[in-house]
Image (tube, rainbow, N blue to C red):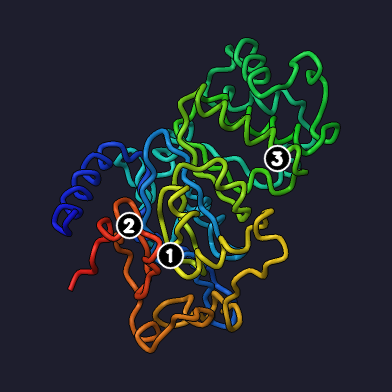
Amino acid sequence: MTAPQVEATATAAHEADEADVVLRLDDLVVEFPAGGGRTVHAVSGISLDVHRGETLGLVGESGCGKSTTGRAIMQLPRPTRGSVLFEGRDLATLSAEELRQLRPKLQMIFQDPISSLNPRRRIPDIVGDPLVVWGRGSERAKVVPEVLEAVGLDPAQVADRRPHQFSGGQCQRVSIARALVLEPEVLICDEPVSALDVSVQAQILNLLEDMKRRYGLTLVFIAHDLGVVRNISDRVAVMYLGKICEVGETEALFDNPVHPYTRLLVSSIPSMETAGVPAEVGTGEMPSPVNPPSGCRFRTRCPLATERCAAEEPKMREVAPRRFTACHYPILDGLEADTVVPEAG
């Protein structure tokens, strides 16, 4: 396949995808004051599309900005700059009441399943409160038991119980039920299994997959565990120090990572084949989000970095159909030669 043919195919796929975009982040920036006139650059100009019905995994090391991105989507708080478009409407420009009207369609599951639930409320009240808030209190008797059963909880057994009487996995099921009771279209999952035992993690992941099919959900799944992300995601976006460095379909990205940082992450996944084999390591120290490096933020740890990486920030570009990376020197030797899109200019 020639380069023009690859470009034409990518363009056609892009146009088809455009109609299916339910959530779009455009040049999203989130910054926080750090005292002494300093600023934490938590999220620095990221752009992402989320397609209806997919699970997009957002992965990276702790402190890379992935949870901040999830909260920025929910406008908790509103981003410093940039836009979050949900079904074409920019959430960042809506009034408080306009944003409130959209909230039922966009829900979030938080990282700590116990602290995210009101310890004084009974489980049916926690799950049913969103219906009351939206003037649908008369539906609680019917809807709450249905949703509790859907997430694997017996309505009769939880009727008079409170969060502290449940395990972390059970509390996460309650959190999922609360998020689903208003029948949202998009569910932001912020590290929903990181606080759980491995066996319980599998149960919750299977539950999320079941709920996705049952309710027609679109998921943004935030995690640092690459094994979990690989199992649940259709596409993966990799973050490093507030920037997106690679986006691609899950298996393609894990089989042939093209960004040096993604390759570093993937090499760290333990498996029977890699047992006893040292993972690839980046050089240098992890920079601070208060004072990120110029140019490519990964350059201080990257074995491929040159002076160009310090002077010029790499732009996100398509290196193969549906494969995008922000790197001056992407690792393309694992891709089929006739699918590689040459760099413009």
Tell which circle, 3 or 2, labels the residue nearer the N-terminal end. 3
Q: Nearer the viewer, residue 207 or 322?
A: 322
Q: Amino acid at mark 1?
A: Cys
Q: Is residue 14 left or right of residue 96?
A: left
Q: Are marks 3 and 2 in contact (CB under 8 Å)?
A: no
Q: Furthest-bottom residue in view? A: 307
Which element carries disc 3, helix, strand or loop?
A: helix
Q: Horizontally, is 43 left or right of 158 in the view? A: left
Across and down, in percent, residue 201 comes to 70, 40
Residue receiving disc 1:
245
The residue beneath circle 2 is 336
Q: Nearer the viewer, mark 3 or mark 2?
A: 2
| Identity of the residue drawn at 78% across and 39% down | 168
Measured as percent of width and height from the top left, residue 256 is found at 45, 58
Residue 112's spot in the image, x, y percent? Answer: 71, 46
Q: Nearer the viewer, mark 2 or mark 1?
A: 2
**Element under label 2?**
loop
